[in-house]
């Protein structure tokens, strides 16, 4: 059993997949395509074809990004959701942000499980040494600044700090953008051999895909209006996308970096 099979057999993964029908068409079709691509990835890997398997796993994440952004557009996130879904660099940026947001939130030692009686996912997390249990939602966390904990507009500074500098961040986005093509296409220097550890790639892309679809569901079902973390993520994505075409972007990085969530 490969990494995708193991994850997709979990109750949480099954629940997310079954909820896709509740998304608006723009998100539903893309999310369904993402799950189908995960299935193709799993079957290819099981057949001894790791290169096309990782290709389809990366494609699944890209489709999940499109589902996530589509739902944000439909639910009134306005200018914050003005991300071009035909731009592979933009989608690579959102995928990278999804991974890094998970890394930031991991400091709270989160865990999730399906509560069948409530038919919802429940999260366990720790804040200041206190353990909390709440319905899982992206509105549980957001980035703040200052002693008063005022909400930040974005977490661009934290993202750049995590990579060390803006140039490394840009290179990582470009690497993600070109990943699928580099898996399949040969060059003047040789032909692709795939990932050294394809199972790790399959696991990462499967988790990202499910996480993005879950976030899309959260956006659609939110009764509080716009979700702070979603707004921050979309605004950060926009800043990263803008920075890709600007050598002198981000002068605000000269100041101190604010607190994480």
Image (spheres, grey):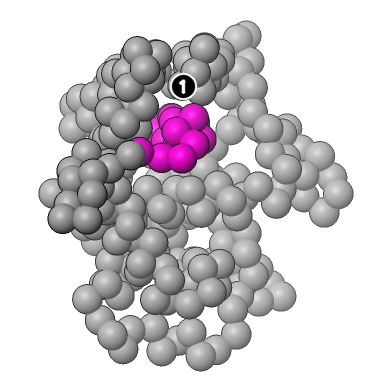
Which residue appears at 60% of the width and 75% of the height? 258
Is 158 rendered above or below residue 101?
Answer: below
Residue 83, given in percent of the width and then of the height, sits at 22, 56
Residue 181, given in percent of the width and then of the height, sits at 21, 45
For disc 1, the neighbor class at 10 Å (few under 14, some 14 to 19, many from 20) is: many
Residue to which mark 1 is pinned: 4
Is 158 rendered above or below residue 85?
Answer: below
The question of residue 198 being in magenta is answered with yes
Is 260 rendered above or below residue 94?
Answer: below
Decide which of 220, 173 is in the foreground and name it: 173
Q: In which quarter of the image is the C terminus?
A: bottom right
Residue 84, given in percent of the width and then of the height, sits at 17, 54
Residue 113, given in percent of the width and then of the height, sits at 64, 22
Quadrant position of residue 59: top left
Which residue appears at 35% of the width and 69% of the height? 170
155 left or right of 22? right
Specify start and end residues of the magenta stretch as a single range.
194-210
């Amino acid at each position: 059993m490969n990494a995708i099979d193991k994850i997709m057999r979990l109750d949480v993964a099954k629940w997310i997949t079954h909820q896709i029908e509740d998304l608006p068409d723009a998100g539903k079709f893309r999310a369904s395509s993402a799950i189908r691509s995960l299935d193709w990835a799993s079957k290819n890997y099981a057949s001894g074809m790791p290169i096309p398997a990782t290709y389809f796993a990366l494609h699944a994440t890209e489709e999940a990004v499109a589902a996530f952004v589509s739902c944000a557009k439909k639910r009134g996130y306005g200018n914050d959701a003005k991300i071009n879904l035909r731009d592979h660099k933009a989608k690579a940026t959102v995928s990278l942000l999804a991974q890094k947001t998970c890394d930031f939130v991991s400091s709270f030692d989160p865990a999730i499980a399906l509560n069948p009686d409530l038919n919802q996912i429940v999260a366990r997390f720790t804040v200041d040494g206190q353990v909390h249990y709440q319905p899982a939602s992206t509105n549980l966390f957001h980035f703040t600044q200052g002693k008063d904990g005022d909400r930040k507009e974005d977490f661009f500074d934290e993202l750049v700090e995590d990579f060390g500098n803006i140039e490394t961040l840009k290179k990582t986005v470009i690497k993600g953008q070109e990943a699928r093509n580099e898996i399949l296409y040969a060059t003047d220097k040789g032909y692709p051999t795939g990932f050294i550890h394809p199972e790790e790639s399959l696991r990462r892309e499967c988790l990202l895909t499910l996480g993005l679809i879950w976030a899309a569901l959260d956006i659609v079902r939110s009764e509080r209006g716009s979700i702070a973390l979603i707004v921050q993520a979309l605004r950060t994505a926009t800043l990263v996308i803008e920075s890709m075409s600007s050598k002198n972007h981000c002068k605000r990085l000269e100041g101190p970096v604010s607190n994480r969530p």
